[in-house]
Amino acid sequence: MTSVAVPSDGVVEDIVGARVLAGIQMVNISRLSTHPVPITARGLITVAGQGPSDSNGAGKSSFIAGLSLLHADEQWRLQSGAQAAAELLFTAELAGQEAMHANADRGYLIGVFVPPQATTAEELDASALTVWLRIIDP
């Protein structure tokens, strides 16, 4: 388990450090499934799909925006076009599902960060860091 020293001002910065993202899970984000997505340096992850009426609505941009937000990338809004993180939440009307589902009032971005040099289960267990971001609709 990783412990974090909290400075006297209560502000904690960069607890991820040199770790890299090993997996991500998104809950109630756009039209994306809640399946965990492994991230690997030895391959390419593609996000494809088609929305209810065209290719703008399957969640591809939301997936990229979620990755950027989880990494605290200052440019995440430019990549996604979102004005606020709450715009990443599932919207039934945009999904063409308003008769069956309600809009999400909260969602989660969950990332597991690991040191790139970790090679054994013991090393991963000792140094993995799980980060949860809760997004709420104001």
Image (tube, rainbow, N blue to C red):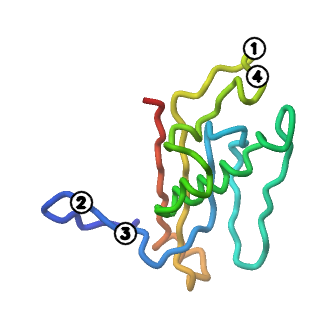
Residue at far top of view: 99
Q: Is residue 128 above or below residue 62?
A: below
Q: Distance of mark 4 from mark 3, alpha carbons?
A: 39 Å
Please tell me whether mark 4 sits on a helix, a strand or a loop: loop
For badge 3, the amino acid type reads Asp
Q: Circle 3 sits on which residue?
A: 14
Q: Distance of mark 1 from mark 2, alpha carbons?
A: 44 Å
Q: Distance of mark 1 from mark 4, alpha carbons?
A: 5 Å
Q: Are marks 4 and 2 in contact (CB under 8 Å)?
A: no
Q: Earlier in the sequence, mark 4 or mark 2?
A: 2
Q: Circle 4 sits on which residue?
A: 97
Q: Residue at x 72, y 18 (%)?
A: 98
- The x, y position of residue 73, in whole percent, is 49, 63
Q: Are marks 1 and 4 in contact (CB under 8 Å)?
A: yes
Left or right, 10 with reference to 125: left
Q: Earlier in the sequence, mark 1 or mark 3?
A: 3
- The x, y position of residue 31, in whole percent, is 72, 38
Q: Earlier in the sequence, mark 4 or mark 3?
A: 3
Where, by quadrant of the figure, is residue 10 drawn? bottom left
Q: Circle 1 sits on which residue?
A: 99
Q: Quadrant of the C terminus?
A: top left
